[in-house]
Image (spheres, rainbow, N blue to C red):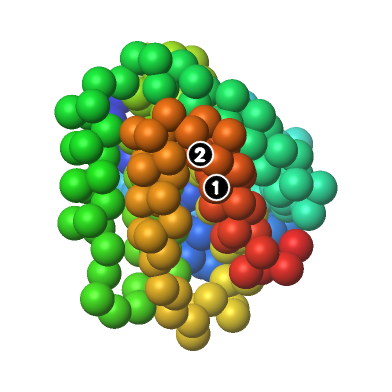
Amino acid sequence: MEPTTKKFICTDIVQSIIQGEYRPNGLLSERKLMEKYGVSKSIVREALGELCNENVLRSIPRYGYEIVTLTESDVRNILQFRVMIECQSLPIVFQKASREELSELTRNLQLLAPEHDQEVWEAWENNSKFHLQLLALSGNRFSYDQIKRSLSILKRAYAQFYWDKWRRVRFHFDGEKHLRVTEALQQGDLALASCLLEQDINSFNAVTNI
């Protein structure tokens, strides 16, 4: 079995959930997925098992695999976790990151800043990219991986709650808020940087009114 085959199936199923093709509480069957991807039952079963381990799906014997429904409480808990990890990592980022690295992060933000509104997931990816790049400067791979996973879960949650609405919505990516975080860091104002970062973490949630 090619490892990329299982990875592709996992990624495609998650993307189908985000795009609304598979709805919360819906059931996936091994047989239909075998037909869709043209692979053996063992490959499909391994992919589905991995998604169960990641709490994307739930196995229901003799019925199939149910798409896990995320709750508002899940979102609030993840946001609280992100604030704790990302904001508390700022002193480490300040100590470890060179001026050149912070300047490069600022330049990247300036390149990302759009002159027009963006499709919601384009705005989401730009926002996520900033948070991951900033956290990467702490040098803590475990924190990075956990926040990356948290962002993936939040993306599914927001798609679940607001997909029908967001298909018709365009967002303005506020790169200015991110620039203010990096400027505060460069000036050594960690309290301001932490406050701005917390506001930004919760800002996407504020749009959804969760």
Residue at coordinates 71% horizontally, 48% vertically from top-left? 75
In this rendering, position of residue 155 left or right of residue 37: right
Marker count (numbered): 2
- Badge 1 is on which residue? 196
Residue 151 location (% of width, % of height): 52, 43
Is 22 above or below relative to 65? below
Residue, x 19% and y 56% (percent of image)?
A: 111
Disc 2 crowd rating (10 Å Cα; few below 14, some 14-19, many 20+) is many
Give the residue drawn at x 49%, y 81%: 169
Any part of residue 194 in sight: yes
User: In x, y percent, where is residue 87?
Assistant: 57, 31
Q: Is residue 23 above or below residue 136?
A: below
- The answer to whether residue 55 is visible is no
Q: Residues within 10 Å of mark 1 (few under 14, many from 20)?
A: some
Outermost residue, bottom side? 168
Q: Residue at label 2? A: 193
- The kind of secondary structure element at disc 1 is helix
Which corner quadrant holds the N terminus? top left
Q: Amino acid at mark 2?
A: Ala
As measured in the structure, the alpha-carbon distance from the residue carrying label 2 to the one carrying label 1 is 5 Å
Q: Residue at x 66, y 64 (%)?
A: 206
Q: Which one is in front, 158 or 90?
A: 90
Kindly check if marks 2 and 1 are in contact, taking CB atoms under 8 A apart as contact.
Answer: yes
> What's the residue type where badge 1 is placed?
Leu
